[in-house]
Amino acid sequence: MSIFSKPKRTEPIPAPLHDIVAPEAGYDAGQTETAVFAGGCFWGVQSVFQRVRGVIDTEVGYTGGAAETANYRTVCEDWTGHAEAIRITFDPNVVTYGTLLRILFSVVSDPTQANGQGNDLGTSYRSSIFTSDEQQARVASEYIAQLDAAHVFHAPIVTKIEPLIAFYRGEEYHQDFGMKNPAHPYVQVCDVPKVAALETQFPELLQEYRQR
């Protein structure tokens, strides 16, 4: 993993015009949903989303390839089809899927960079949204079109929308890495600024992180 700090925004990007709204979607109280995103090194992606109000649990792992290659050493060879990813379990009555996408694009990753994030290059670091149903795919696709039409970013969004086939939980030492290793140089340079950006752009969505 190489050192990379995502350029910091002071204001969040626009919210999606179309979202999965709890009353309309018919979610019951206490019902949870999942979202799977890839946006570079999964340490920093988890460091952000585990601090979002309405997020119940996060796991880092691999998706996009086969079960037998879903391990860190092999994925780093960059031929497996896997991306370093995060599975987010969230309460849709508290935070919407579209809001999670907004945080992904505004705070976590650069959606205009293909096959990598910053100096972390390769398809395993790609920016992708892995959707579990047609509704998620539609919201993600419409949001990307919305942001491109508004020229929110300096270049077109290249984030892929891929169907989620399977998610493979990553090795235990990768789980909550930023929280367990706050002094790690990569965490300090790459992940701490993302958490700070979340605090600046979405203060109303912050929750204290509690290790589970």
Image (tube, rainbow, N blue to C red):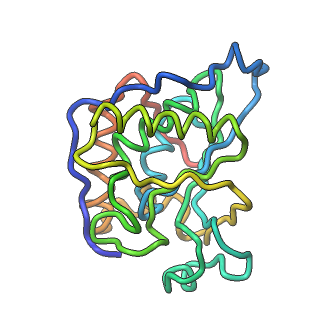
Q: Is residue 75 above or below residue 98?
A: below
Q: Position of residue 92 (x, y in %)?
A: 65, 27
Image position of 35 (left or right of 5): right
Image position of 188 (left or right of 61): left
Q: Is residue 182 above or below residue 75?
A: above
Q: Is residue 116 above or below residue 103?
A: below
Q: Is residue 56 above or below residue 66?
A: above
Image position of 139 (left or right of 166): left
At 20% from the left and 33% from the top, the residue drawn is 10
At 42% from the left and 38% from the top, the residue drawn is 103
- Place residue 137 in its image quadrant: top right
Q: Nearer the viewer, residue 83 or 28?
A: 83
Q: Nearer the viewer, residue 141 or 187?
A: 141
Image position of 134 (left or right of 148): right
Task: For the N terminus, give its image quadrant.
Answer: bottom left
Q: Position of residue 163 (x, y in %)?
A: 67, 54
- Place residue 184 in its image quadrant: bottom left
Q: Position of residue 46 (x, y in %)?
A: 48, 52
- Place residue 198 in its image quadrant: top left
At 41% from the left and 68% from the top, the residue drawn is 115
Q: How many marks?
A: 0
